[in-house]
Amino acid sequence: MSKVFSAHAVSVDGYITGRDPGAGRGLGDGATLFDWYFDGDTPSRVFDGFRLSEPSARVFDAFAGRVGAVVAGRNTYDDSDGFGGGSPHPNARLFVLSHRPAPEMSERQTLVTTGIEDAVAAAREAAGDGDVGLMGGGVLTEALKAGLVDEVILHQVPVLLGGGRPFFQTLPGHVRLRLIEAVPAPGVTHLHYEVER
């Protein structure tokens, strides 16, 4: 069965955006979270235009190559201007979890309004042999509450943003993680955790 995982760039103080994110503003003043995508000399095999350090390319492409479908939250969708009608991943269908109506979606996008379980089930079906990637703190929180997450990957950027959207939201209890791998790289440390059941 496919795995469900979250891989996010996050500041040391736990933010996945800077202050004032939104449509037309992207991550607000938090764009530095993605500098490592372009600060190296190794082209990504999955994402055109990404030039990462060698260790970051190895880690990033390993995860990106697994993705068959993506579930994103509505804030992530809006902040990203609807991904231009596509998906945050070049080869994966996008499922947007929202309780609010959304503008017209493209053929690569599906709105799911009936909860995280339905969104992940639809994404798993679309992913086939691939895995399901989760985008957004709200989506990850809901998936963790529902016991649907297998792995959490933090691309921790050495910056304190001091504000923005926090990655982790309130959970009903502790979620234990087991560190699988820690890879230091220029401008980022990649932390790969397995969710303990």
Image (spheres, helix red, strand yellow):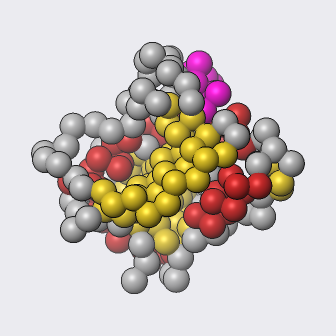
Q: Is residue 29 left or right of residue 56?
A: left
Quadrant into which the N terminus falls: bottom left
Is residue 62 placed above or below 28 in the rendered structure? below
Q: Is residue 124 left or right of residue 79?
A: left
Q: Residue at x 86, y 48 (%)?
A: 41
Query: 57 or 8: which is nearer to us?
Result: 57
Q: Position of residue 113 (x, y in %)?
A: 32, 53
What secondary structure do most residues of the magenta stretch adopt? loop
Q: Position of residue 168 (x, y in %)?
A: 33, 39
Q: Is residue 134 magenta?
A: no
Is residue 116 placed above or below 30 in the rendered structure? below
Q: Residue furthest right?
A: 41
Query: 54 or 38: which is nearer to us?
Result: 54
Part of the protein shown in magenta: 24-33
Q: Residue at x 40, y 66 (%)?
A: 4
Quadrant into which the C terminus falls: bottom left
Classify residue 121 by image quadrant.
bottom left
Q: Position of residue 22 (x, y in %)?
A: 52, 25
Q: Residue at x 52, y 83 (%)?
A: 129
Q: Is residue 86 left or right of residue 121?
A: right
Evaluate whether residue 48 shows in this view. no
